[in-house]
Amino acid sequence: MFIALLLALVAAGFSHAVITKQKTRTAEFILLYVLIGYCALPLGFIGLRALLMPEIMIQNMKLTAEPSFVRFTASLIVALAIMAVLALRLRGAFLIAPVIGWAVFWLGADYAHIGLLHDHGQSASAAYTAQIFAAHGMVSLVLLAALAGYWRQRS
């Protein structure tokens, strides 16, 4: 499901550039669609929910963390979501901050998922690792590639 959303957002950004006849801005549109549609909106809502109801997040994700730590990490996710939304307005060099922040977040999510299995004495299968990478790590690559394309198009 996550890979379908990611592909749809990349396609939407590409289509936006074609329809508006702004092909030189393709990377920028892809970047903004992924930042808002994959990062800011879904994770921003999850972060707000975790801020308001950390116990539910702990139960749903099978965490061993205290509610105060969940609130702290949720506030970081909300901050990243706000940065991504601001990227719509500010653009330019400001895009670096949310892209790097979300790229690190998604790579960290990969590491956390694999680490969770390791913490429970299990190893990750190749299929599980590929699934996690498709839902998390791939987003990092798309964001970083789109940012590189954006800077290349600008110069």
Image (cartoon, grey):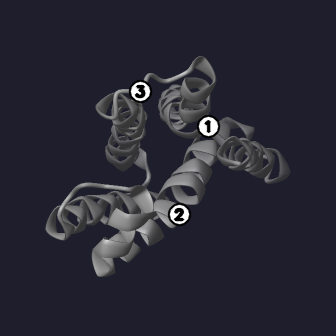
Q: Closer to the camera: disc 1 or disc 3?
A: 3
The amino acid type found where label 2 is placed reads Pro
Front residue of 13/74: it is: 74
- List x then y, in percent, for residue 80: 34, 57
Q: Closer to the camera: disc 3 or disc 2?
A: 3
Which label is found at residue 42?
A: 2
Which SS class for mark 3?
loop
Which label is found at residue 27?
A: 1
The amino acid type found where label 1 is placed reads Ala
Examine the rendering and report whether any part of residue 154 can be seen: yes
- Measured Cα–Cα span from mark 3 to mark 2: 29 Å
N-terminal label among 1 and 2: 1
N-terminal label among 3 and 2: 2
Which residue lies under the disc numbered 3?
Answer: 122
- List x then y, in percent, for residue 35: 51, 52
Which label is found at residue 17?
A: none
Q: Closer to the camera: disc 1 or disc 2?
A: 2
Quadrant in the picture for residue 22? top right
Front residue of 63/137: it is: 63
